[in-house]
Image (cartoon, helix red, strand yellow):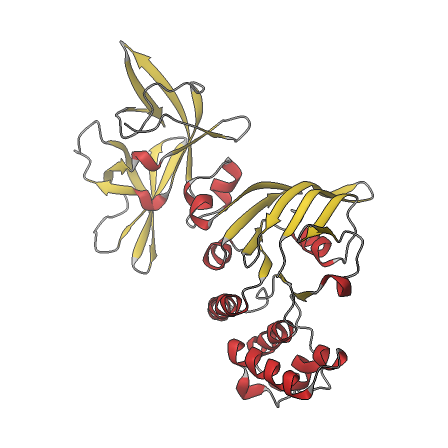
């Protein structure tokens, strides 16, 4: 097993800064996803962990030992790429066993490791086929089995499902999660798919422009974003992000959103607010309920349904709150709303999140009484 540490790691390619300064740990047995858009530095970080890139600054440690200048072979890692790394002239079985034969392991041990990895990745039925004859998903499963058979200290995955369709990606997520549970090894997984990262990971590291924005459990990343970037990048449909202002009159505190005033109660945990008067408020579409327009004034914002998007069991409503502000709400399809309906939006106030309008940093609010 390996406990991986990045200490002040940076990587420059000439004038291009791929990774600015990275301080991060991957604990023994932990599955961590590096999540972000193309060019954010996640693959470079993975390649530094593998020894395929040497950092411009900082150190990489495995179990407290510096490995910054060690080769990939000296690190005892296994890496799975976007393109399945299988030799076309060998059977799947021979591919999975290739590195084990290179290590001159006993035949019985090689056979046992191959069978075990094949069982975990569910490719027993293609072991004696050539890579060109198997389904692309099975070929990628074989590439992962090849890595598993080596029994490395650390698994590194560079968007291994990116060339598969949505249904196969979902299947592969389940299989790789099961395989990780069986091996008990640390793993780093690069992806730009936030749903994939949330589904498969113990922790998610959100990256932007070479920097680590936030690292935490999937629940922390979704419910407690530390930055506006995390809140907007993670979640589908995207979070509602609206300009807001805190007002106070005769000792009563109110929240003004989209030109409408929402009285503040203890559920919002905003009394005693010491943040800026103007900021951004984030509201997840699933945490907004649609109500008739005559709902109590103190409970809701008001608007008109501009557009409806059926999404199977739910419908996504785009609601015009003002000429310049729109909110999205997911509601069960059993509810019968139509475009043009006037509605009230009941907000799950304790789940609202607040961000500095200039820096994007999350703003803390008083704990609810």
Q: In the image, is residue 359 above or below residue 127?
A: above
Instruction: Locate residue 6, reporting x and y percent.
Output: 67, 46
Q: Residue at x 54, y 65 (%)?
A: 184
Residue 191 in which image quadrant? bottom right
Q: Is residue 112 left or right of residue 85?
A: left
286 and 58: which one is in front?
58
Q: Is residue 254 above or below residue 11?
A: above
Q: Position of residue 179 (x, y in %)?
A: 52, 70
Which residue occupies the extreme top position in the image? 250
Percent coordinates x, y for residue 295 in the rendering: 17, 34
Q: Quadrant of residue 7?
A: top right
Q: Residue at x 73, y 61 (%)?
A: 75
Residue in the foreground of this view, choosing between 146 and 256 = 146
Residue 46 showing in the rendered view = yes
Q: Residue furthest right?
A: 14
Classify 330 as above or below 323.
below
Specify whether residue 306 is in view: no
Q: Quadrant of residue 251?
A: top left
Q: Nearer the viewer, residue 304 or 349?
A: 349
Q: Quadrant of the C terminus?
A: top left
């Amino acid at each position: 097993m390996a406990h991986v540490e990045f200490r002040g790691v940076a990587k420059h390619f000439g004038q291009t800064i791929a990774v600015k300064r990275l301080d991060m740990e991957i604990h023994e047995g932990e599955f961590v996803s590096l999540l972000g858009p193309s060019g954010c530095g996640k693959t470079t970080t993975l390649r530094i962990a593998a020894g395929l890139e040497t950092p411009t600054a900082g150190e990489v440690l495995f179990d407290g030992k510096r490995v910054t200048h060690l080769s990939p072979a000296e690190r005892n890692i296994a890496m799975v790429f976007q393109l399945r790394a299988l030799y076309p002239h060998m059977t799947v079985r021979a591919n999975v066993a290739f590195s084990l034969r290179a290590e001159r392991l006993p035949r019985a041990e090689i056979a046992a490791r191959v069978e075990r990895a094949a069982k975990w990745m569910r490719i027993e039925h293609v072991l004696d086929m050539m890579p060109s004859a198997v389904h692309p998903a099975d070929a990628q499963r074989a590439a992962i089995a090849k890595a598993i058979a080596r029994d490395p200290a650390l698994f590194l995955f560079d968007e291994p499902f990116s060339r598969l369709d949505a249904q196969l990606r979902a299947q592969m997520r389940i299989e790789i999660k099961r395989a990780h549970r069986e091996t008990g090894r640390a793993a780093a997984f690069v992806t730009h798919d936030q749903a994939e990262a949330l589904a498969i990971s113990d922790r998610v590291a959100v990256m932007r422009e070479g920097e680590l924005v936030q690292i935490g459990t999937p629940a922390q990343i979704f419910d407690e974003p530390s930055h506006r970037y995390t809140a907007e990048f993670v979640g589908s449909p995207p979070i509602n992000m609206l300009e807001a202002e805190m007002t106070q009159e005769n000792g009563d505190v109110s929240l003004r959103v989209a030109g409408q005033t929402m009285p503040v109660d203890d559920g919002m945990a905003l009394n005693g607010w010491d943040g800026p008067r103007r900021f951004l408020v984030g509201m997840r579409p699933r945490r907004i309920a649609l109500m008739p327009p005559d709902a109590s004034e103190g409970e809701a914002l008001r608007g008109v349904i501009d557009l409806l998007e059926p999404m199977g069991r739910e419908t996504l409503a785009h609601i015009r709150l003002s000429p310049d502000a729109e909110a999205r709400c997911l509601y069960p399809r059993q509810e019968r709303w139509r475009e043009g309906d006037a509605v009230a939006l009941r907000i799950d106030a304790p789940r609202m999140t607040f961000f500095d309008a200039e820096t994007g940093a999350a703003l803390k609010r008083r704990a609810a009484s």
